Amino acid sequence: MRTMGLDVGSKTVGVAVSDELGFSAHPITTVRRTNLRADLHELTRLVTEQQVDRLIVGLPLNMNGSEGPRAGESRKLGDALADHTHLPIVYWDERLTSVAAEKFLIEADVSRKKRKEVIDQVAACLILQGWLDSQPRIEDE
């Protein structure tokens, strides 16, 4: 059972997937956004290629927990993707994941140019890993 995590931005979507056991998230790509139809086509291709059966979409909440315009855009793409793929979707609080991703990449001594290329993937990975870590495990029950 593989899960895909998405960090939805206005220009790009960072994509990460879990391992088959659902223990760890791995960044796979960044999709450049053009229009909803093209975005859905590319993300659906990745869903099929990665054999995904669930989607986790980062929801950029305000610091007070309310939803702003960016959250609405994430929901719009997430809902369209869920309708298009018929997969269950979970919205996950992504507050400060981009900041955490940037800090992680700086500490790993990744160049500024390379950080720009992979930051959305790393943010998607953090979103997905946060959700995976919140799920009960069989040994926990």
Image (cartoon, grey):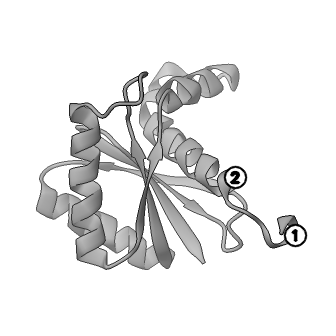
Q: Is residue 106 left or right of residue 51?
A: right
Place of residue 88 in the rendered image (x, y in percent of width and height, measured from the top left)? 41, 72
Q: Amino acid at mark 2?
A: Asp
- In this figure, which residue is indicated by the disc labeled 2? 133
Comparing 33 with 65, the one in front is 65
Residue 140 lies left or right of residue 46; in this view the side is right
Of residue 123 and residue 79, the one placed in the foreground of this image is 79
Q: Position of residue 34 (x, y in %)?
A: 15, 49
Q: Which element type, helix, strand or loop, lies under badge 1?
A: helix
Q: Report which residue position mark 1 lands on.
A: 139
Q: State how far apart marks 2 and 1 are (Cα).
A: 13 Å
- Give the position of the N terminus as an image quadrant: bottom right
What residue is drawn where x is 54% and y is 40%? 122
- Say above or below: 18 vs 91: below
**Number of residue marks:** 2
Residue located 69% across and 26% down the image: 108
Provide residue 7's location: percent of width, then percent of height: 41, 45
Q: Amino acid at mark 1?
A: Glu
